[in-house]
Image (cartoon, rainbow, N blue to C red):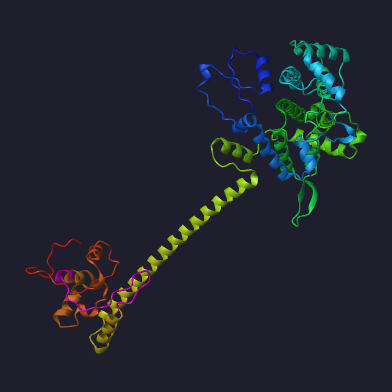
């Protein structure tokens, strides 16, 4: 994890480069930069969990590695460092005892070549990497050997910790490139460590499946990238930091292959023995695994820009760990939680939509029923006076209390004295108009005989609602009795 902020004049350019390689925090005290937007590192909680609780972090990552790769008990124990390593050709800690002893002696003398990898050693080697980034167009870079004399001078300077002016023209790009390979070749173990050797072979075997669930010969790139992301998370910090710098250099070199004639696969042939191969083994010891290792190295070069980002579910687990929430053990748990929330949200939204649709449908049905009743009543009332008309009005009055869709059942028709006559007059003016009034004078059937029965069951609140709505709402006229001193048709009612 690297958080970088620079202020001009405070830190020399070379020191900034070293601190970038070591991946330290650089605190900027320049007030002119404080107004700049702060970029939050998405892997912050991942790095925090790795440094503060390494056992919890390792268990989280390894559980997800085993989800992607089938690791037998022995290989899993080797990955966790619980048993002795069994490598091709008998290579391992036992066979490299004297080599390890010599490397410890070199470390005591502060010699970087042949010593275990340290952050200080990476800071020295970064001078070579920085110089090579400026000379990527040299043809045959990393393939053409340099001058051995110049390489020895440069090697001694790096071992002594002295600053080197590579821009002076004293050294050639091939000298620097060869010395970088020499540094990697003399490490006590490969850059990706012995413990991860068998896992890389399994990653190379990750293939896609067809529709019938049969394994194909097409590599599953997404799963391979995810497995490498997880595996790189449990590398020792110095190894991971140098690997990131190296793969980025090789990625940029491959992008200039039209000039330097070095493709990703050509570069993989040069670096696979130093990055992946176990120490003290030959090509005969690896046999058919050579192709897998070379292709795996080329794959890492091509996809280097994606391999050092923690998977999203690892970030989420680390974040939840520090926020006090329940931590999920793997990606499957996070997917299950997310799917449950998604399904419950979709179900609630579907139920709400169904309720809205049902209510709107009931309102439309009720409105159509009321319109039909109003038209039917108007048609019967406009018929000429006859026995048939009286019979229809009687039947209409008899069935006016039936329940319509979306409404509550009508109360039984009970002959009661109405309370207000002015209400009756107002209803008659609103619904029937002057025709209703003239028919009453001619002793025609009164509006009371053709009442729908709805007003009889309405409460006082329904009465207020009756005249606040639109004319589309049809009500049944009836006779209402006014208090003493009130006359029918008297104005003053709020409509």
Left or right for 253, reference 389: right
Q: Main secondary structure of the magenta part?
A: loop
- The reply to whether residue 178 is in sight is no
Q: In the rendered view, would you say 177 is above or below 396?
A: above
The answer to whether residue 78 is left or right of residue 42 is right
- Classify residue 435 by image quadrant: bottom left
Q: Where is residue 177 drawn, in percent x and y? A: 81, 21
Q: Is residue 416 magenta?
A: yes
- Locate the C terminus by quadrant: bottom left
Q: Position of residue 186 (x, y in %)?
A: 83, 22
Task: Specify the quadrant of the image occupied by residue 357.
Answer: bottom left
Taking the spot 42% from the left edge, 66% from the top edge, the residue there is 361
Q: Outermost residue toward the left?
A: 485
Q: What span is colored magenta in the figure?
A: 400-423
Residue nearest the observer in this picture, 153 or 465: 153
Residue drawn 22% across the image and 69% down it: 430
Image height check: is 27 above or below 302? above
Q: Is residue 385 magenta?
A: no
In depth, the one of 383 and 409 nearer the eye is 409
């Amino acid at each position: 994890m690297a958080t970088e902020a620079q202020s001009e004049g405070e830190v020399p350019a070379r020191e900034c480069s070293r601190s970038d390689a070591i991946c330290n925090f650089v605190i900027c005290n320049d007030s002119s930069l404080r107004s700049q937007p702060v970029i939050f590192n998405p892997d912050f909680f991942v790095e925090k969990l790795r440094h503060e609780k390494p056992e919890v972090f390792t268990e989280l990552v390894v559980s997800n590695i085993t989800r992607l790769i089938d690791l037998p008990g022995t290989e899993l124990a080797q990955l966790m460092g619980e048993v002795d390593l069994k490598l091709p050709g008998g290579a391992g800690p036992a066979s490299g005892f004297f080599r390890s002893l010599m490397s410890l002696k070199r470390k005591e003398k502060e010699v970087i070549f042949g010593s275990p990898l340290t952050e200080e050693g990476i800071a020295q080697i970064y001078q070579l990497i920085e110089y090579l980034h400026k000379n990527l167009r040299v043809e045959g870079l990393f393939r053409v050997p340099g001058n051995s004399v110049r390489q020895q001078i440069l090697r001694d300077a790096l071992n002594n910790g002295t600053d080197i002016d590579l821009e002076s023209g004293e050294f050639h790009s091939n000298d620097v490139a060869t010395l970088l390979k020499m540094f990697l070749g003399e490490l006590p173990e490969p850059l990706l460590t012995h413990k991860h050797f068998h896992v890389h072979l399994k990653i190379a075997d990750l293939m896609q499946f067809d529709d019938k669930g049969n394994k194909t010969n097409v590599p599953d790139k997404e799963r391979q990238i995810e497995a490498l992301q997880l595996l790189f998370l449990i590398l020792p910090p110095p190894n991971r930091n140098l690997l990131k710098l190296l793969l980025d250099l090789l990625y940029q070199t491959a992008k200039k292959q039209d000039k330097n004639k070095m493709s990703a696969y050509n570069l993989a042939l040069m670096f696979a023995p130093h990055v992946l191969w176990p120490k003290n083994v030959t090509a005969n010891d690896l046999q058919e695994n050579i192709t897998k290792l070379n292709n795996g190295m080329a794959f890492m070069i091509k996809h280097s820009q994606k391999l050092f980002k923690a998977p999203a579910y690892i970030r989420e687990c680390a974040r939840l760990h520090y926020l006090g929430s329940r931590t999920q053990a793997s990606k499957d748990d996070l997917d299950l939680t997310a799917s449950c929330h998604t399904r419950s949200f979709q179900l609630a939204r579907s139920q709400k939509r169904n309720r809205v649709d049902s209510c709107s449908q009931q309102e439309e049905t009720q409105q159509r029923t009321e319109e039909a009743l109003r038209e039917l009543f108007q048609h019967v009332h406009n018929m000429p006076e006859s026995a048939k008309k009286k019979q229809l009005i009687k039947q209409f009055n008899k069935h006016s209390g039936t329940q319509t869709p979306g409404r509550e059942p009508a109360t039984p028709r009970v002959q009661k004295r109405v309370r207000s006559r002015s209400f009756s007059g107002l209803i008659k003016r609103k619904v029937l108009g002057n025709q209703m009034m003239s028919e009453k004078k001619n002793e025609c059937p009164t509006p009371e005989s053709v009442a729908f029965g709805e007003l009889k069951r309405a409460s006082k609140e329904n009465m207020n609602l009756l005249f606040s709505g639109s004319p589309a709402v049809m009500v049944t006229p009836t006779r209402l009795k006014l208090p003493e001193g009130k006359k029918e048709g008297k104005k003053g009612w709020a409509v």
